[in-house]
Image: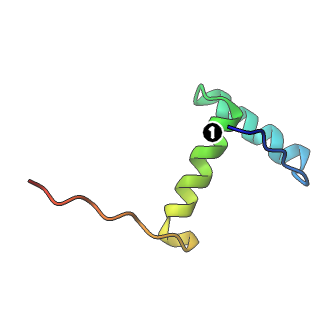
Amino acid sequence: MTGWKLEGISTEAREAAKEAARQEKLSLGEWLSRLVLRAAKSPETGGETPAKPDPD
């Protein structure tokens, strides 16, 4: 995995993200990845909800 640098994030947003990650016992990168993937899949944000597998 390669590094990724975010610019233009306010100090307030950065600190809030760090605190949220700490509370969930995740690294900041792990927390942000989960947040981004969840938002991308959310119908409210324009993402599509993945299809559920058919029960066997």
> Residue lying furthest bottom in this view?
46
Q: Against 34, is 41 above or below? A: below
Residue depicted at 75% across the width and 34% down the height: 18
How many circles with numbers are drawn on the protein? 1
> Residue lying furthest front in this view?
1
On the rendered structure, is 18 left or right of 48?
Answer: right
* Residue sitting nearer the eye, 56 or 24: 56
* Residue sitting nearer the eye, 23 or 50: 50
On the rendered structure, is 21 left or right of 13?
Answer: left
Name the spot of residue 27 as percent of width and height, x first. Answer: 67, 29
Residue depicted at 57% across the width and 45% down the height: 34
On the rendered structure, is 54 left or right of 16?
Answer: left
Name the spot of residue 14 as percent of width and height, x first. Answer: 82, 42
* Residue sitting nearer the eye, 48 or 9: 48
Determine whether the residue tagged by mark 1 lies in a helix, strand or loop: helix
On the rendered structure, is 19 left or right of 45?
Answer: right
> Residue lying furthest left in this view?
56
Name the spot of residue 38 as percent of width and height, x first. Answer: 53, 54
Residue depicted at 45% across the width and 70% down the height: 48
Check the picture and name the quadrant holding the N terminus.
Answer: top right
- Badge 1 density bin: few <14, some 14–19, many ≥20, Cα 10 Å: some
The amino acid type, in three-letter code, at marker 1 is Trp
Residue depicted at 8% across the width and 53% down the height: 56
Query: Which coloring applies here?
Result: rainbow
The residue carrying mark 1 is 31
